[in-house]
Amino acid sequence: MFAPGIAQVMDEFHSTNSALSSFVISIFILGYAFGPLFIAPLSEMFGRLYVYHVSNILFTIFLIACGKSTSLGMLITFRFLAGIPGSTPVTLGGATAADIFAPQQRGKAMAVWSLGPIIGNYTSTAR
């Protein structure tokens, strides 16, 4: 959702570096990759519900900070930080399904849960 507006962002911060514009877009994925390293152990120590709530709050705060950024460095930093709590649903989704459903029903629950990313990926690449 951010990529179509990168030209306006780069104009706003007076930058013409195309490599930097790609980095601004992809830095979120780097945070998304590092997130599970922190989120999974925290969910085992403090419980999944607590981690879900804290992650939602942090994700919202970091996205607001992205919108209020006054420099490209700030935007890159806050996009990275937003990626970390942004990975919580994918990181904890399978474990949450295992917590909620009986072992006999987990296969169906995981199949339904995995449809979200699959359909999302399909619709974003189908254009």
Image: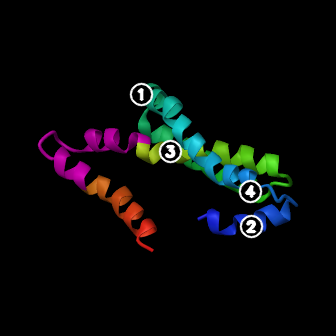
Q: In the rendered structure, which disc, 3 or 2, sits on the residue that comes first in sequence?
A: 2
> Are dots 3 and 2 in contact, CB under 8 Å?
no
Indicate the amino acid at tag 1: Glu
Determine the CA span between mark 2 and mark 1: 41 Å
Residue closest to the eye, 17 or 71: 17
Indicate the amino acid at tag 4: Ser
> What residue do we see at 56% from left, 49% from top?
56
Indicate the amino acid at tag 3: Ser
Q: Is residue 92 magenta?
A: yes
Which element carries disc 2, helix, strand or loop? helix
Q: In the rendered structure, which disc, 2 or 1, sits on the residue that comes first in sequence?
A: 2
Q: In the rendered structure, which disc, 1 or 4, sits on the residue that comes first in sequence?
A: 4
Q: Quadrant of the N terminus?
A: bottom right
Determine the CA span between mark 4 and mark 3: 27 Å
Determine the CA span between mark 3 and mark 1: 16 Å
Q: Nearer the viewer, mark 1 or mark 4?
A: 4
Q: Which residue in the protein does label 4 denote?
A: 18
Q: Which residue in the protein does label 3 denote?
A: 87
Q: Which residue in the protein does label 2 denote?
A: 7
Q: Which residue in the protein does label 1 denote?
A: 44
Q: In the rendered structure, which disc, 3 or 1, sits on the residue that comes first in sequence?
A: 1
Q: In the rendered structure, which disc, 4 or 3, sits on the residue that comes first in sequence?
A: 4
Q: In the rendered structure, which disc, 4 or 2, sits on the residue that comes first in sequence?
A: 2
Q: Nearer the viewer, mark 2 or mark 1?
A: 2
Q: Nearer the viewer, mark 4 or mark 3?
A: 4
Indicate the amino acid at tag 2: Ala
